């Protein structure tokens, strides 16, 4: 069966990596979900079947307080067994980012969960990193929370004291249709 993202990915000069063999079976994805303790959105599962761990030449727009800026996606996270899988990466992120940081470093997180009265926060378990840009800034998918299934971009160092956490799309499918080839 043809993957619904094939045309998009071909336009974005998809490159595959030997560390993430594709295609990924439904059984492998079921195992990932069991390890995560959460179901992946159907559109993201379909993407992973044929494009797990690939890199692309793509950009997307982020609305920064009324003005749009262009951001890039460099690599999509991969599904796999063991240390290279989504679940392993998810738990590694939770562990490595478990120390609390100032809320200012996480501005905009009220988009994922209510943040009133919170003075410190660590990595949110609602978020699964599904890709990064060239600066290793995460692109995340909300597994649950205020906007389950939404795609977020976290620019770790904000520009001009603005928020640094943005809703990019309300679903993975919407995100894929926003991607443009980076010239």
Image (spheres, grey):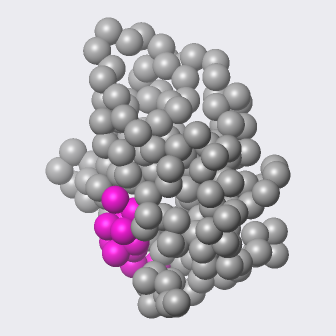
Residue at horizontal 43 percent and vertical 83 percent from the top: 4
Q: Is residue 62 left or right of residue 152?
A: left
The residue shown at (75%, 69%) is 20
The residue located at (49%, 41%) in the rendering is: 127
Percent position (x, y) of residue 28?
69, 63
Residue 169 position in % (x across, y down): 31, 58
Quadrant hosting residue 67 = bottom left
Residue at the spot 32% in from the left edge and 9% down from the top edge: 117
Whether residue 43 is situated above or below residue 161 in the rendered picture: below
Q: Which residues are magenta?
A: 171-183
Residue situated furthest left in the rendering: 66
Q: Is residue 96 left or right of residue 138?
A: right
**Between residues 73 and 46, which one lies in front from this camera angle?**
46
Magenta segment: does it hold 134?
A: no
- Given residues 151 and 146, the one toward you in this image is 146
Q: Is residue 34 visible?
A: yes
Q: Is residue 136 visible?
A: no
Q: Quadrant location of residue 88?
A: top right
Counting from the top left corner in percent of width and height, residue 26 is at 62, 68
Is 174 included in the stretch rendered in magenta?
A: yes
């Amino acid at each position: 069966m043809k993957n619904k993202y094939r045309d998009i990915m071909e336009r974005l000069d998809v490159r595959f990596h030997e560390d993430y063999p594709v295609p990924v079976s439904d059984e492998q994805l079921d195992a990932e979900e069991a390890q995560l303790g959460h179901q992946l959105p159907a559109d993201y599962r379909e993407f992973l079947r044929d494009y797990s761990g690939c890199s692309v030449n793509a950009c997307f727009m982020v609305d920064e307080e009324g003005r749009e800026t262009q951001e890039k996606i460099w690599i999509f996270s991969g599904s796999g067994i063991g240390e290279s899988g989504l679940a392993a990466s998810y738990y590694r992120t939770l562990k490595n980012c478990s120390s609390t940081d100032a809320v200012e470093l996480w501005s905009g997180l009220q988009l994922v969960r209510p943040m009133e009265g919170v003075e410190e926060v660590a990595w949110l378990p609602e978020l699964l990193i599904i890709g990064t840009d060239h600066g290793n800034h995460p692109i995340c998918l909300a597994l649950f929370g205020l906007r389950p299934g939404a795609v977020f971009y976290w620019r770790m160092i904000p520009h001009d004291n603005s928020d640094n956490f943005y809703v990019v799309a309300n679903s993975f499918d919407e995100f894929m249709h926003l991607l443009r080839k980076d010239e």
